[in-house]
Image (spheres, rainbow, N blue to C red):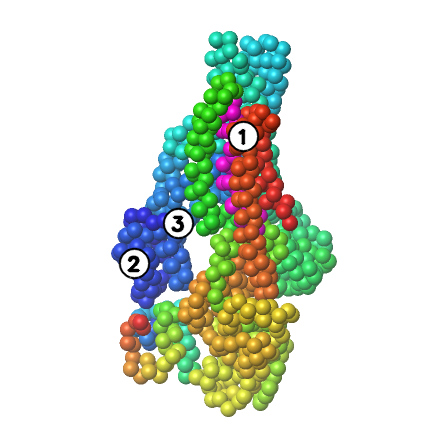
Amino acid sequence: MKKIDPVCGMEVSESSPYKSLFGGKVYYFCSSNCKVAFDRNPEGYLKSGPQGMPQ
Amino acid sequence: MSYDRREKIRVVGMHCATCVNTVTKTINKVNGVENVTVNLATGYAEILGNFNLKEVVDSVRKSGYDVESQDIRIAIRANPENFSGIVDMVSSINGVISLHLNPATGILSLKVNPLTFSTDALLERLKGYNVSLLESGNASEVAIMKGELNSMVSSLVVASVFTSFVLYFQYTGFTLYALLSSIPVMLYAGRRYFNGAYRALRNRTADMDTLVALSSGTAWIYSIINFLHGGSVFFDAASLLVTFVLVGKTLDSYLRFRISFIHVPKLQARLSTGEMVDADQVNVGDTVIVKAGEPVPVDGVVDDGYGEVDESILSGEPLPVGKTKGNPVTAGSSLVSGYLEVYTTRSGNRTYMSQLVQAVNDAGTTTIGLKRTVDRITSYFTPSIIVISVITFFIWHFFVPASLALLFSIAVMASACPCALGLATPLAILVQVRRLSRKGVIVRRGDALEKIKHIKTVILDKTGTVTAGQISVIPKEIIDKRGLEMAAAVERLSSHPVARAISTLSEEKMDVTEYTEFPGEGVMGTVNGHAVLIGKREFIAKNCELNMDGDIIACVDSKPIASFLIRDKIREGMKEFIDELKIHYKVMIATGDSSSFADEVGRELGVTVVKGLTAEMKAELVKVNENVMFIGDGVNDALAIKQAYLGISMSSGSEISKQAGDVIVTSPTAIKTLIDGSMTLEKRIRENLAWAFGYNAILIPLAAGILYPALYLAPQYAALAMSMNSVAVTLWSFLRP
């Protein structure tokens, strides 16, 4: 099933190796960059939605 | 060296736009790259500019992706002093990523980009050399070397027999028969030198073949002319010269053939049907039976049985290790006692042992900086000898008859040995890489030995590297025993050492669904309809109420039900080793563990501990420090090992970390052996060079007649002495303790 990367907004598959658990829910990412950015500020991304590729 | 080029490579592992960004940025940073276009759909990256392809590939790999490449091996017959010219020539061909030329075997191993490399272009460039493409594996290399050795032996036999006729006829006055007997010596046995000289001339260089051909050819043709005009003849000198050079060169080839390869032993495997087959015919998934006293023929996992396995060949660890169902075994180790049924995961040349042997064979052939300098000197050597030889003739012909002056000049050419100079550095590297491999230090990239002296920072992973990795988990607080059984059931599905330790706390088997692992953080799953979560404190804090102390917390339905402390043992000798490292380097420990135990380890060893790091954060730590040697073992260390200036992985570690390492060691303290080995290498190279240069420096003036008439070195003896120089360098390299 396709999921949305909460950091860059891309569609990602559930088989992506980059994932985080936050508030009991699993989030999937397209790359380690997005995962690292999310882990630093999960609430920020969940509140304001995808903000494009982290630099 | 860099070239104007346009390359198209296939990048493996890109699956999103961020990957494209990362790869584009990474390639753009490489020196000389002017333009990069990366296509996510096809995986192709097109690169323009004046860049080095190897740097591009290395940088892409360091950033966590891979580049499709192909291995090609070819055998080349050339003199060692020509090797660096061949390497330069081949590295300028489009699509060549990297190459190693084994000085002992003349085997050129290439890593190429299959999209732009053409074998025809390679063969066209090497036209003039005797070149053959090899199948993978080293069986065909051995066959080629054996063939070469056999051909040298048959040349030597012909030369020896006919030279004895030449001597007999010349000293008994039958000069015509001496001339006739010398023909097979010169034109059959000596043809390799004349062919070689012609090839060198076509490539506008001069090498040992040039000197042998010039010296023996001059003596022979001069003798034929004099024979026709009734002057003095030197058929004996010309024939002996060729024979003596062949004696030395055959001996040298034999020695190098004997020591060129580390052979993977041919193993036999017993299938479950009882049938014995060659180990490389076993397929993945086959069950193999190993009885006490037999070697393990494949890589695999024990399916049934129990036994003690001697793994010293791989780990250097002398004590046999107990193996039972579920434990991995490796081809090449041997079963000391017991009985095992092994499920095959890898066989033939894909086993860990075969790959290591291949890596060590290749690493021994790396070119290092010092070799480049020596190669430059060597390229001037032969032309200088020819000049010295002409000057020798010119000076002597004022004082002695022209025929004797000519013999002096021929002796100069026959005495000079550029081969030994060409062999001095690569043989020292080859020997050092082999020696270290016997001490449990597997050098996968030869330049690792050169990099050691530039290291500024040493970063060690904690679990499994600084500590023994035999983790014990101590329950701290248990509120719900049933919940603990559920947590143990979920942990049973993970291979992490902490998870394995927790899984042993309960024997009860439960069905786990929706299992998900978050590497370096924790795991979750559903047991009997309950959501079970277990992991590090920080991971739990984001997903569950947290009102418990401990390093690892287990939660059921968002309520903590148990907590644990993690303890491990610092490896023996680690304190002394780190104290020694601290004298020369900045030392720190990087760990994913965020428990209080990490701080304890730091305090005990007296080093800074950076804790709670993910794989990416470890790699980042490597990036911000100067010239880092990173030592690790886990999956989460692989990125940092790749990123490091020198990446070292532990042989007991994960497969992925071993693939990333430049060097594989059995224990961190073996790094001391590696550091010592690198220092010894530099010393050995200097010794070899001193020997090779010194030998020439003494022999050439003697051949030129500097001590004449007190000491006269006839051309044939000068040639014998010359050919023994490479034998001496080879022996010196291998026999020196």
Residue range of the region highlighted in magenta in the rendering: B407-433
Q: Is residue B424 magenta?
A: yes
Q: Tell me the chain of label 2.
A: B
- C-alpha separation, residue under disc 1 versus residue under disc 2: 67 Å
Residue B218, can we see it? no
Label 1 sits on residue: B706
To the question of a shared chain for discs 3 and 1, the answer is: yes
Whole-percent x, y for residue B363 in the image: 51, 50
Residue B264, x across and y down, in percent: 60, 47
Q: Relative to residue B69, is residue B181 drawn left or right? A: right
Q: Amino acid at mark 3?
A: Ile
Q: Which residue is mark 3?
A: B97
| Badge 3 and badge 2 in a common chain | yes
N-terminal-most mark, 3 or 1: 3
Residue at 27% x, 56% y: name it. Answer: B34
Give the amino acid type for the residue marked by disc 2 in the picture: Val
Give the residue number, with chain letter if any, for mark 2: B38
Rendered residue at 62%/63% (across/down): B327
Query: Label 2 crowding class (10 Å Cα cut-off): few <14, some 14-19, many 20+?
Result: many
Categorize mark 3 by other alpha carbons within 10 Å: few (<14), some (14-19), many (20+).
many
Of residues B514 and B616, the one drawn nearer to the viewer in this rendering: B616
Residue ID at (30%, 60%): B28
